Image (tube, grey):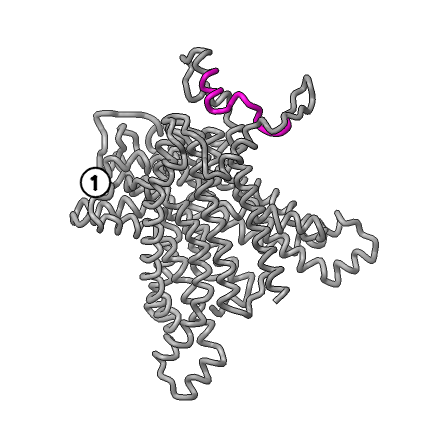
Amino acid sequence: MGRLAYIGFAIAALFILAAIFAPFIATHDVNAQDLFMRYVPPTAEHWFGTDGLGRDVFSRVVFGARISLEVGITVVVVSSVIGTIIGAIAGFYGGFIDKFLSGYVFNVFLAFPGLLLAIALVAFLGAGQGKLVAALCVIGWVGYARVMRGQVLKVREYDYVLAARALGASNFRILFTHILPNAVQPLIVQASLGMAGAVLSEASLSFLGLGIPPPSPSWGTMIDEARQYFSNSPHVLLFPGLAIAMTVLAFNFIGDGLREYLDPKQRSR
Amino acid sequence: MKHKILNFARQLGLMLLVIWTAVSLVTLLIEVVPGDPATVILGETATQEQIENFRTKHGLDRPAFFMSYSSDSGFVWNGMENRYAEYWQGLLQGDLGTSFQTDRPVSEMIFERYPSTIKLAIAAMLVAIGIALPLGVLAGSRKNSLVDNFASFFALMGISLPTFVVGPFLVYIFAVKLGWFSATGSYYPEDIILPAVTLGAALSAILTRMVRSSVIEELGEDYVRTARAKGVSERMVLYKHVLKNGLIPVVTILGLQLGVLLAGAIITEKIFNWQGLGLLLLDEGIGKRDYRLVQGCVLVISVTFILANSLTDLVYRKLDPRIRLT
């Protein structure tokens, strides 16, 4: 695997550890306000400075990792399970079911710009972490379904699948014990790129005021709050911005690295 | 010929089916609003009479769909007197309903703002092409060189850095520190540059990658070897032969990305207070709970996206006869 993929793993591990041990790493109470300490630049006391309400930016960025990764992981797990099942059904059964699912349902979901669909769903459902996750799953599953369908179409013609069928194995058994394990690799690539997408979408929706409402330390919300006084206190925006960029970059590195590793044809490019 | 016409009809049919589903989904989205939309909009202090008037005026007193279900009476057929059918009837006459807040026709509000968003999306696309084409060609023709490494780094940064981080920093440097442009709004023609660069940054990154791998792939083809053997200069090989073929997938991406840019413009418009469709959706639509306006905005952006995608698909087939999409 390429060097960048290892860098990606290292950064991702750093953020995951920060998210798990956030209460021990944070130096201040995440919502404690101190109006006498507004927009303080980075100091020994406040490593990343303070925001417009005098809250410690470092502690908020650390706790923000929790929200981002929690949303990202939930979205990836839920949408990959749904997408895998639907994609497997489409690829395995073929015929009318496949035509309906891949020819119509997939196209409908791909026909909406993802962010717009999520905005529309959240606008009507209302803001909140659960609803945000639901909206991101609605736009996320179709990517996994397409990958899975393609893999199943490829693998189901292999000799060992035909042999299993000849031995009388049930469709369910063939799908889960023979086809699925062989289709997992591209799904992992899709999941790591999906993780980057989910983190970015969560931050984008929170930035638009449609994600996780304040005072939760979501990175997107922090950036939205920091915009007003950005010209005087750029640090309030810089650190959550860097956190988002590094997390997204890490998962993109991992996804790209794994894709190259798993697909030797791409290695020469 | 017959095959071509059939294929075209199939494409057209699918496009219409997708548009129908998109419209239906958007129309029915209002049904998922928790509680009664009239109460949500008028507030808790509204009298029963005000709520009734509002519901009658905006057709909210009618059933949502052709059929409804309740535990008491089971499935009930509501006939044509339902909101879904009425929305469609209006839509076919170019009427997107009346705003819940301003009482103005939604279509009028949208088409006042849409040109601004399209202008921004086209400017962003031009920025992206202006950056990606030279950088991608240089990187692809000098694989593993310093330029190539820089292009790869630039592409990764462009994909990973969110618009709402890039935008404020561009404002900080070019508007606040250097004073070259207005920080927000659009007062002078050059004020489109910062929003266009912000919106086009991610696309330029994707395009740079595409142009680079396209150039690398085409440089390995037989016709390039033949051209070189005939003594054609390297510059001519690159610009006349390689680019001509290598740009086909790039054109496709451009078409597909137009819709993404229109949707992504929502964030850029918020950063720069750019008075386009995105800001209308956010401030007037979602901010003031004007669900009719939200429906209209989402619908117009989605249909543009679908049309752009379908057109790209057709152009893609036309450009390269080798391509037969299934």
Farthest-out residue, bottom = B230
Circle 1 is placed at which residue position?
A: A231
Direction from residue B12 to residue B203 in the image, left or right: left
Provide the secondary structure element on which disc 1 rests. loop
Along the viewing direction, whichever of B232 and A148 lies nearer the viewer: B232
Residue B13 highlighted magenta (yes or no): no
Residue at x 22%, y 50% (from the top left corner): B189
Pointer 1 local density, CA inside 10 Å: few below 14, some 14–19, many at least 20: some
Q: Quadrant of the C terminus of chain B?
A: bottom right
Q: Which chain's residue wears label 1?
A: A
Location of residue B104 in the rendering, given as x and y in whole percent from the top left corner: 37, 30
Along the viewing direction, whichever of A204 and B72 lies nearer the viewer: B72
Location of residue B86 in the rendering, given as x and y in whole percent from the top left corner: 53, 31
Residue at x 26%, y 46% (from the top left corner): B169
Residue at x 45%, y 18% (from the top left corner): B39
Direction from residue B73 to residue B80 in the image, left or right: left
Q: Which residues are magenta?
A: B52-67
Location of residue B141 in the rendering, given as x and y in whole percent from the top left corner: 38, 73
- Decide if residue A54 is in sight here: yes
Relative to B27, is A4 above or below?
Answer: below
Query: Looking at the picture, which amino acid does disc 1 mark?
Result: Ser
- Decide if residue A242 is in sight here: no
